[in-house]
Amino acid sequence: MTEPGPGERECPSCGFAVPEDAEVCPYCAYEFPVRKASMTLSAWLFVGLMILFAVPLLAWLLGWFG
Ligand SMILES: [Zn+2]
């Protein structure tokens, strides 16, 4: 039995400590559920950054061509 250390979590199927970012257990091939909340957060961060860059660019383009 291996205790999960920092950056690790215990596989609910076989009990081994696997890397926290592993999507599949390397010991028993158990598939960890994907954390959709963090995925959505990164997606929104990406959209926010795109808008942050796109709005001044659009304003510049409209000012240039208008
Ligand atoms: Zn496992």
Image: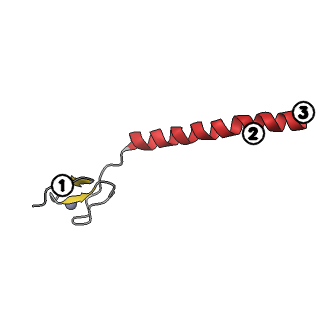
Tell me which amino acid carries mark 2: Leu
Mark 1 is surrounded, within 10 Å at the Cα level, by few (under 14), some (14 to 19) or many (20 or more) other residues, namely some
Q: Secondary structure at mark 3?
A: loop
Dot 2 beta carbon under 8 Å from ligand 1: no
Label of residue 66 in the image: 3
4 versus 57 height, above or below:
below
Q: Quadrant of residue 39?
A: top left
Label of residue 27 in the image: none
Mark 3 is surrounded, within 10 Å at the Cα level, by few (under 14), some (14 to 19) or many (20 or more) other residues, namely few
> Which is nearer the eye, 39 or 55?
55
Tell me which amino acid carries mark 3: Gly
Furthest residue toward bottom: 27
Q: Quadrant of residue 52?
A: top right
Mark 1 = which residue?
4
Mark 2 is surrounded, within 10 Å at the Cα level, by few (under 14), some (14 to 19) or many (20 or more) other residues, namely few
Tell me which amino acid carries mark 1: Pro
Q: Where residue 32 appears, x then y in whole percent?
A: 29, 53
> Which is nearer the eye, 5 or 50?
5
Q: Where residue 57 appears, x then y in whole percent?
A: 75, 39
> Ligand 1 is located in which of the four quadrants?
bottom left
Q: Quadrant of residue 27?
A: bottom left
Sooner in the amino-acid sequence: mark 3 or mark 1: 1
Q: Tell me whether the residue at label 3 lies in contact with that at label 1, contact meaning CB atoms closer than 8 angstroms.
A: no
Q: Residue at x 71, y 34 (%)?
A: 55
Mark 2 = which residue?
57
Dot 3 beta carbon under 8 Å from ligand 1: no
Sooner in the amino-acid sequence: mark 2 or mark 3: 2
Q: Residue at x 24, y 59 (%)?
A: 18
Furthest residue toward left: 1
Q: Where residue 11 appears, x then y in whole percent?
A: 20, 55
Furthest residue toward right: 66
Is 49 left or right of 5, judged from the image as shown?
right
